[in-house]
Each structure stands twice: as C-alpha cells, then as structure tokens.
Amino acid sequence: MRTHNQACRQGFSTYFITATALYEQLSNALLDRALPKLRRQLVNTKLLIIDDFGLESIPAELEPILLEIVDLQSANGSLLLTSQFPSEHWSVKFTDPTIAEATLDRIVHRAHVLELHGESLRKLKGKNI
C-alpha cells in the first residue's frame, strides 16, 4: 500500500486491487458485458498493483483476459505484484499451461524481484517494535 501512496504523491495514476477482487470484477464485467471498460480502467494507469497474487487459482475463463491485461499494462505502464509464493510456483494457479507460460513470461521478463525474509511487519507492528 505504501508504494501506491508514494506513486499517487508523485502524480502517477495508480490502481490497487487484490487478486481475488480482480477476478471478481473481471467475472462480473464478463456477465455485464462491461469488460472493455474495466480493461481500459486497469491498463490506463501508470501503476497497476495486484496484491496477494497466487493465493488462489485463476478461473479458467479469466486466464486469457489476465494475459491481455498483463500484456497491455507492460506496454503502457508498470505492474506490481505481491505474493506469498515465489514466482516459480505461480504456473500451477493456471489451468492452461500455454497461457500460464505466456502470462508469466510477460511478468517475469521485465521484473525486479524483491524477496522479503524475516517476520511479518504486521506481527512486528503488533509487538510495538
């Protein structure tokens, strides 16, 4: 969340969403025929942040849409993913291995990976340290 706030302070358009909420919004947009509008909203930001990526499997019908969003965003701005899982475990969250490979290739190709180790900041904050 701090990255989102800092990007906003510097005048960058940002969009923050959890992966679960993203899948819900994409599913609803498919049903409501509002996918083009949501897709534009997601990729027309300088920084798209998807939090908690990989906690759940990606619904099969959303996999090609996610690929398109990642592809468009990589040409348009920056993508920040947070995850509890190393990126080498993300492919099992897809049902289609070809879409998984294409999506993850676009994500990892330009990635700067930061691995955090140690206790959770939430735990430390709870201890008032």
Image (spheres, rainbow, N blue to C red):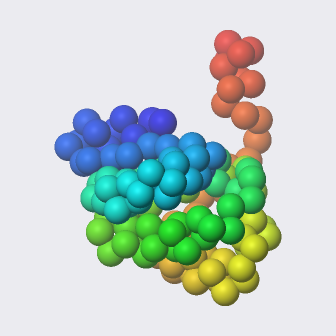
Relative to 22, say whether 6 is above or below.
above
88 or 125, nearer to the observer = 88
Relative to 51, say whether 61 is above or below.
below
Residue furthest to the front in view is 32
Q: Is residue 41 left or right of residue 91?
A: left
Q: Residue at x 74, y 59 (%)?
A: 57
**Is any atom of residue 98 visible in this view?**
yes
Residue furthest to the bottom in view is 98
Residue furthest to the left in view is 11
122 or 60, nearer to the observer = 60
Q: Is residue 93 left or right of residue 45?
A: right
Rendering coords of residue 95 (x, y %): 75, 73
Rendering coords of residue 118 (x, y %): 76, 41
When asked about the image quadrant of residue 54, the answer is: bottom right
Residue furthest to the top in view is 128
Rendering coords of residue 86 (x, y %): 73, 62
Q: Residue at x 74, y 51 (%)?
A: 55
How many callouts does the rendering have? 0
**Is any atom of residue 87 visible in this view?**
no
Q: Residue at x 68, y 68 (%)?
A: 60
Q: Residue at x 33, y 47 (%)?
A: 14
Q: Is residue 15 left or right of residue 53?
A: left
Relative to 12, say whether 46 is above or below.
below
Q: Is residue 10 left or right of residue 97?
A: left
Rendering coords of residue 18 (x, y %): 57, 44
Q: Quadrant of the C terminus?
A: top right
